[in-house]
Amino acid sequence: MDSLGLCILLMVLCFQWTTAPAAEEITWTYTGLVGQTEWSEYFPDCAGNAQSPVEVVTTQTKYDPSLLPLTPLGYSQHGNKPFAMYNNGHTAVIELPEWMGLGGLPWLYTAVQMHLHWGSGGPSHGGGEHTVNEMSADAELHVVHYNSELYPNMSKAMTQSDGLAVLGILIVTGEETNLAFNNILNYLGRIRHADQKVFIPAFDVQTLLPEDLGRYFRYNGSLTTPPCHQSVTWTLFNERIQISPAQLLKLETILYSSKAEDPDRMLLQDNYRTTQPLNHRVVFASFSAESGRELTSGEVTAIVIGVMCGCVGLAVIIRFIVKTIRSTSSWDVLHSSRPAPMSRMKEPEEEKKQDMALNSTCEAGKKEEPSPSPQRDP
Ligand SMILES: *[C@@H]1O[C@H](CO)[C@@H](O)[C@H](O)[C@H]1NC(C)=O
Ligand SMILES: *[C@@H]1O[C@H](CO)[C@@H](O)[C@H](O)[C@H]1NC(C)=O
């Protein structure tokens, strides 16, 4: 009996051992044989009902005033130890030091890595994963953290519902070169092929983030790549960061998904997943969708009040100066017994009366002149 039980246990263990790595060895891609639509055949979580990325419809987000600004911890204290960066055939991954973390969530989350998603068609042709009001970004940066208060490491945390926290940063193209972004871009040429790895100088990761860390969208979702575990507390920043068209072009064309020894080179492009159904999930916003309008109207009120106060102040000052000049001038001293404005007002009235009298006499004269009209003598 005991040996039979042991045998069954061994068989089960053996079965698990042989099947488990099989899924991990599956070479998934974004299009093709094991493309996005087939992921769930090999990775069941990819068919879950709380998948990422999602389309954020801002008018359908729920304002949650308890969502405070996120605080990156130690992002700027990068130290002297270089960061490891590698091409995993799906993206470029930059490993982050364990002292980097995230505050402002119910648990303390420790940074693990960051990576990018991009397209192939240049500016305005997609590449970002999350969309906002049906607008897609040109690329997207993900900074991945695991819940280090509850779990010992990333691999344990990634299967737990409260295991991971990912920052999503939408990237669009603009005029200027993003110098912080060059800390990554400058070294992609060293990891053109899958499985290649390079050490890059450590840099201030916070310079990659948008300035406004207070406005973001929050929802419960998943990893956007297999095994698609639904373990991610997502933070999608409202502010987008900008890179130049040349930087985007470099990102889109420099890496291969194929290995160095592969005879057929495959460009690593369009490594973004399409948006997944929300399925009754709520996307929360740390800011009110109407706060933009309220702020402007508030600003307008402030400006109006400011201008009014300024005008009143100026009027008071001018009045004071005029009063001071008048009280010290000899003219006012001489005519102090009689109010000056009264005399001024009388003068034009008298002139007017004289004018009117003059006009009436003129008119009378005019009327008299044409009295012998030419109609009388035909
Ligand atoms: C992660 O932690 C689990 C649970 O303690 C452990 O079994 C596993 O070996 C660890 N994995 C790594 C990669 O350290
Ligand atoms: C995420 O799920 C947890 C557990 O169900 C829940 O307590 C939390 O409010 C959810 N957060 C969001 C942003 O929906």
Image (cartoon, rainbow, N blue to C red):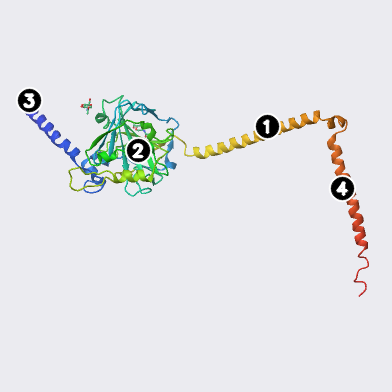
Q: Is ligand 2 closer than 8 angstroms to the Cβ of mark 4?
A: no
Q: Which residue is mark 2?
A: 182
Question: x and y percent of residue 210 in the render?
Answer: 41, 36
Q: Mark 2 to mark 4: distance in Å?
A: 81 Å
Q: Are marks 3 and 2 in contact (CB under 8 Å)?
A: no
Q: Which residue is mark 4?
A: 352
Q: Mark 3 to mark 2: distance in Å?
A: 63 Å
Q: Which residue is mark 3?
A: 2
Q: Mark 3 to mark 1: distance in Å?
A: 97 Å
Q: Mark 2 to mark 1: distance in Å?
A: 52 Å
Quarter of the figure with residue 285: top left
Helix, strand or loop at mark 1: helix
Residue sitting nearer the eye, 295 or 322 = 322
First in residue order: circle 3 vs circle 2: 3
Quarter of the figure with residue 40: top left
Question: x and y percent of residue 355 in the render?
Answer: 88, 50
First in residue order: circle 3 vs circle 1: 3
Quarter of the figure with residue 306: top right
Q: Nearer the viewer, mark 3 or mark 1?
A: 1
Judge whether 94 appears above or below 139 on screen: above
Q: Which residue is mark 1?
A: 313
Q: Are marks 3 and 1 in contact (CB under 8 Å)?
A: no
Q: Are marks 2 and 4 in contact (CB under 8 Å)?
A: no
Rendering quadrant holding ligand 2: top left
